[in-house]
Image (tube, rainbow, N blue to C red):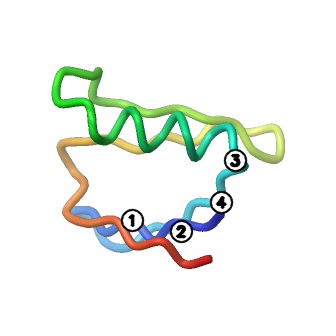
Amino acid sequence: MRLEVTTVWGVQIHTLNSRDLKRFEEWYEDKISRNIFTYSRDGYAWHIIKPQVKGIKYID
């Protein structure tokens, strides 16, 4: 699943597998979760910072 995340710094495209997508949705909807969501892809750690997110759009 690909996400288009609009942040205060611009648009980011993130590709998540089904397990990470489920974790992301739980994290994003939880008002008291920590501010940074981390997942790994292609050997790198990727981060989404909740206070900077303005909108989420599911691409496919």
Give the spatial CA distance, label 2 vs label 3: 16 Å
Displayed quadrant of residue 28: top left
The type of residue carrying mark 4 is Thr
Mark 2 or mark 3, which is nearer to you?
Answer: 3
Callout 2 touching callout 1 (CB < 8 Å): yes
Q: Which residue is mark 2?
A: 13
In-front residue for pair 16/25: 25
Q: Residues within 10 Å of mark 3 (few under 14, many from 20)?
A: few
Q: Position of residue 17 (x, y in %)?
A: 72, 49
Find residue 15 and name its label: 4
* Label 1: which secondary element: strand
Find residue 51 and name its label: none
Q: Which residue is mark 3?
A: 18
Which of disc 3 and disc 2 is earlier in sequence?
2
Find residue 5 and name its label: 1
Which of disc 1 and disc 2 is earlier in sequence?
1
Above or below, 59 relative to 9: below
Give the spatial CA distance, label 3 vs label 1: 17 Å
* Label 4: which secondary element: strand
Above or below, 35 relative to 43: above
Q: Residues within 10 Å of mark 4 (few under 14, many from 20)?
A: some
| Side of 48 relative to 45 (left or right) | left
Above or below, 47 relative to 53: above
Q: Residue at x 58, y 46 (%)?
A: 21
Callout 4 touching callout 1 (CB < 8 Å): no
Callout 4 touching callout 2 (CB < 8 Å): yes
In-front residue for pair 27/5: 27
